[in-house]
Amino acid sequence: MARISYMEAARQALAEEMRRDPLVWAVGEDLGRGGVFGQYRGLVEEFGPARISDAPISEAAILGASVGAAMMGTRPVVEMRFSDFALCAVDELVNQAAKARFMFGGQTRVPMVVREPIGMWRSSAAQHSQSLESWYAHIPGLVVACPATPADNKGMLKSAIRCDDPVVYMEHKNLWPLEDEVPDGEHLVPFGVARTLREGRDVTIVSWSAQVHVCARAAETLAQHRIEAEVIDLRTLWPWDQETVLASVSRTGRLLIAHEAVQVGGFGAEIAAVVAE
Amino acid sequence: MPETPRRNIDIARLRDQHRLMWRIRALEEAALRGLGDKVVLGAIHPSIGQEAVAAGVVGALRRDDILLSTHRGHGHTLAKGASSEAMLRELFGRVGGNCGGKGGSMHIADFEVGMLGANGVVGANIVIAAGAAHAIKLKGEDKVVCCIFGDGAINRGPFLEGLNWAAVFGLPVLFVCEDNGFAATTRTASMTAGGGPAVRARAIGLPAEELDGNDVLAVEDTAQAMIAAIRAGGGPRFLHAKTYRLTGHTGVDTAPYRPADEVAARKREEPILRAADLLRGAGVAEAEIEADRIAAEAEMNAAYDAAIAAPFPGPEAAFLDVQDVGSPALGAF
Ligand SMILES: Cc1ncc(C[n+]2csc(CCOP(=O)(O)OP(=O)(O)O)c2C)c(N)n1
Ligand SMILES: [Mg+2]
């Protein structure tokens, strides 16, 4: 076990996958200087500018070109900089990446990872702070991943790169410096398997991404008041681990969902509906 | 338009193109018949009158080259080598269609012959084509990507983004603007500022040529030269082929927004008649010229009969090929 940051975990994951598979490459604005947050630091030195590729400020082309490159057998890792800017490429993600396999009757796959940093961060206001994970969970064909810890950011990014489906990979900007233990060696986290970080009999708290840490602290506060909360980190919103959540709620009889996104039409509503059903 | 005299017409090549253009025409007539017979349920966008672009450009590609097309892509797809029966099955939503009946006319694709898809979103294929070429360059292959789009598509953002992308990365793509004068019911010129597609392409640094897109030999000659330059590592090129859409925008559009005498004049310049005139002038017998039409119609009639006899996919197909992880086929929905 090594103690590394959420950002360093992702950097290592990408470097390991690029060493393992020469068809993996990354593309996005400013990657040659390490990316806007430094999450690509040092990679161009090892892999060169063709595989850690700069891009013009052309979000539709960054995503759309990656769809074409994925259909031709490479595995692009696409950096969208902020999830807010990925909205300039919604057609390419929703109409093209997500639909190609189905629409063409299984003739192709679109193995790409679309990295979309999300969340409130450094007083960045309305165009640099959104968490739009529920939008993508609504789209058949996409996988939606929201890692909360350094270990998950390593294991989930590696799984995302190996996945044959397009994965919307949402890293929380406030988590970049967070340090924690990450397993040594090959570490892969499967999609659709939640992580129960605290067991408890009184109430189930379901969350993902940065809110998981808020929920963990809240559970400690509750424990001081002799309320034992079970805290579940969903990790992926599509697919989401209904089994773990349903089993927990059937024990506790109470459910609290916490996410950073807008409440109306949020993914929390989907969980509440499934549990109520 | 009188034909410019040519000294060295390659008769065999022209005959092949004449044959292919008739196959495209007959395929689309079969598709329109399918619309009338209510076996085509969705929209179809015929390219009748535009066949020289498909035959000339796509005919200049290698089988392992890559093609991306538009909602008006039947001709391109057939020219790339897709089977006419599989295409009609696809248009009719049947088993054995190129996409298992799930794509239909607007999303037809045949990856076996390097046809990576028509696209229901105008202009969307331009950036995808740039990316397909990007992969070819990363893998060090010598394939070329050909991306065909309409005159309306040059007003969408992906046109700028895709051409710039191909230019800065020096990618092997031939962009072809198949200009039929209309974007749906609107004359494209009325909604397009500046000097047109080739001027825009040159402004981004792509060598670009404009030509008469109903002259199949000119289209093929120019496409061939451009493809050779691209394959030699010269970077992307741009071809603006001017043609005319003889039908409405879709199979049900009667196009009342344009004068009948305009259409009548354009009919006299359509590419199959012009190719036939050249063949006649070069001494090919009338019966042989006619045989190309008859053979094409026979092929498409047989394909039509086979396609309407094919079964529809079962309801389970709606949940297949969505995704591996979280697949709705596993009852997750
Ligand atoms: C992004 C987008 N906007 C609008 C449409 C509706 N639409 C379908 S075809 C078409 C006209 C396209 O004109 P052009 O690019 O010249 O191609 P053509 O139909 O003439 O072959 C329009 C507006 C669409 N499919 N996609
Ligand atoms: Mg047009």
Image (spheres, grey):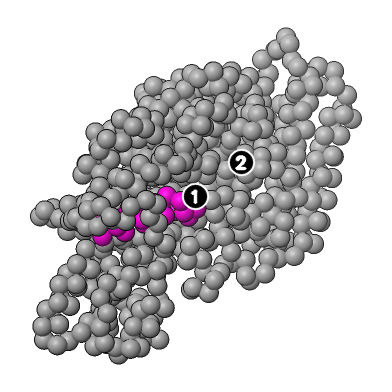
The numbered disc on residue A185 is none
Instruction: Report the side of B187 relative to B219 (left or right).
Output: left
Q: Is B34 on the left or on the right of A275, as rendered? A: right
Snapshot quadrant of residue B306 = bottom right
Q: Position of residue B57 (x, y in %)?
A: 62, 29
Looking at the picture, how far across and down is residue B53, in whole percent?
Answer: 62, 31
Instruction: Identify the amino acid type marked 2.
Output: Met
| Location of mark 1 (residue) | A110
Numbered badge on residue B115: 2
- At label 1, the amino acid type is Val
**Mark 2 or 1, which is nearer the eye?**
1
Task: Give the residue at x 54% y 18%.
Answer: B232
Segment colored magenta: A149-168
State whether the magenta stretch is mostly helix, strand or loop: helix
- Chain label for disc 1: A
Give the residue drawn at x 31%, y 59%. A152
Which element type, helix, strand or loop, lies under badge 1?
loop
The answer to which of A30 and B219 lies nearer the viewer is A30
Q: How far separated are the C-alphas under marks 2 and 1?
A: 16 Å
Q: Is residue B282 above or below residue A200?
A: above
Q: Position of residue B50 (x, y in %)?
A: 63, 36
Q: Are marks 2 and 1 on the same chain?
A: no
Q: Indicate the quadrant containing the N terminus of chain B: top left, top right, bottom left or bottom right.
A: top right
